[in-house]
Amino acid sequence: MRLALVFGGSGQMGRPLLSRLRRRGWQVLAVSRREQPEAPGLRWLRGDLECIEGLPPRVDAIVSCGPLDHFARWYARSAVESPRVVAFGSTSAEVKQDSADAGERDVATRLREGEAQVLSTAAGRAAAATLLRPTLVYGAGGDRTLTRIAALARRWHRFALPADACGLRQPVHVDDLALAAFAVLDVVATHGRTYALPGGETLAYRDMVARVLATLQPPATLHLLPPAAFRALLVLAHAGGVARDFGDAALARMREDLVFDAEPARCDFGYAPRAFEPAAGMFGAG
């Protein structure tokens, strides 16, 4: 019976991955800072990437569903042996590298450096690493984009966007990401590779948001404002302490197409993500 060590197992991508691993006969060690309920085939280790109690000397696979830069540093100094490593990053490594916002550029730099460190560490240990870059994640109420939009819309029963928020998006469900992480484990073609993982449908930003608002109870109204009016509204929101981390770079990105090619993932490990069909419960409590 094979043994997997999973970081971020209590998160939005980690939980469906734990379930899939256990259903397929894996024994799982998952790491959490907080106490978690035990289950058949699943044991939780207390700690974080700085200090973990009870790590085994060897596992059959290590999977990271949490922050890539922190995992990369842990992996570089860890003594745990494993022939297989799978780690989630983000398409932000590409999207934000030329951002006008210094903080966003720093995020992109840390992601790319984390990717390089994981690949180089694995190569030095004769291990096989695969990196996965999701696009806009949704489905478990733990994301920072659509769930946040839903929360604001629930509060005000409405949500506003600039009318030119027509940049294309490919939201991807957490279950499809968990399936991808599991699928690559035994596929030799994925060794040493990095894959974009977009969702199965490409749609305009404002249409994506409209579908989210339609799932709320009661549904919230979407207001499309002239860009100048939206910017004035955003200034007022910032003054009131709302969305202060939403700046000019994020606003400009609403007009940009952020589209990624799923064909390499489809060819190498059968990646087939679902269309964007949001439902009540995917974006936190109603």
Image (tube, helix red, strand yellow):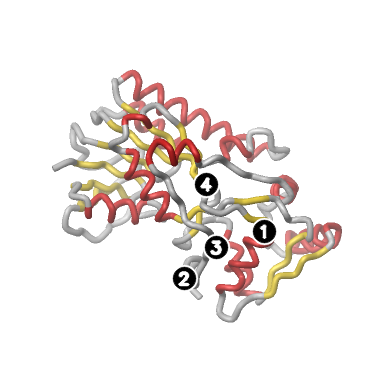
Q: Amino acid at mark 1?
A: Ala
Circle 1 — which element? loop
The answer to whether 116 appears left or right of 214 in the picture is left
* Mark 2 or 1, nearer chain start: 1
Which mark is first along the chain, 4 or 3? 3
Front position in the image: 235 or 173: 173
Report, in whole angstroms, how far the alpha carbon at label 3 lies from the one at label 1.
13 Å
Residue 272, compared with residue 242, is above or below; it is: above
Q: Secondary structure at mark 3?
A: helix
| Viewer-proximal residue among 231 and 271 | 271
Q: Tell me the number on the disc at residue 281.
A: 2
- Disc 2/disc 3 C-alpha distance (Å): 10 Å
> Residue visible at 32% across and 55% down?
34
Residue at disc 2, secondary structure: loop
Look at the numbered discs 3 and 1 and tell me whether their residues touch, using CB distance below 8 Å. no
- Residue situated furthest front in the rendering: 267
Is there a contact, CB below 8 Å, between mark 2 and mark 3? no
**In percent of the image, x 42 and y 49: which residue is there?**
177
- Distance Cα–Cα, label 3 vs label 4: 18 Å
- The reply to whether dot 2 and dot 4 touch (C-beta < 8 Å) is no
Instruction: Name the residue beneath numbered marker 3.
Output: 147
The alpha-carbon separation of the residues under discs 2 and 4 comes to: 21 Å
Residue designated by label 4? 198
- Percent position (x, y) of residue 246? 68, 53
Q: Which residue is mark 1?
A: 243
Q: Earlier in the sequence, mark 3 or mark 1?
A: 3
Label 3 sits on what residue type? Thr
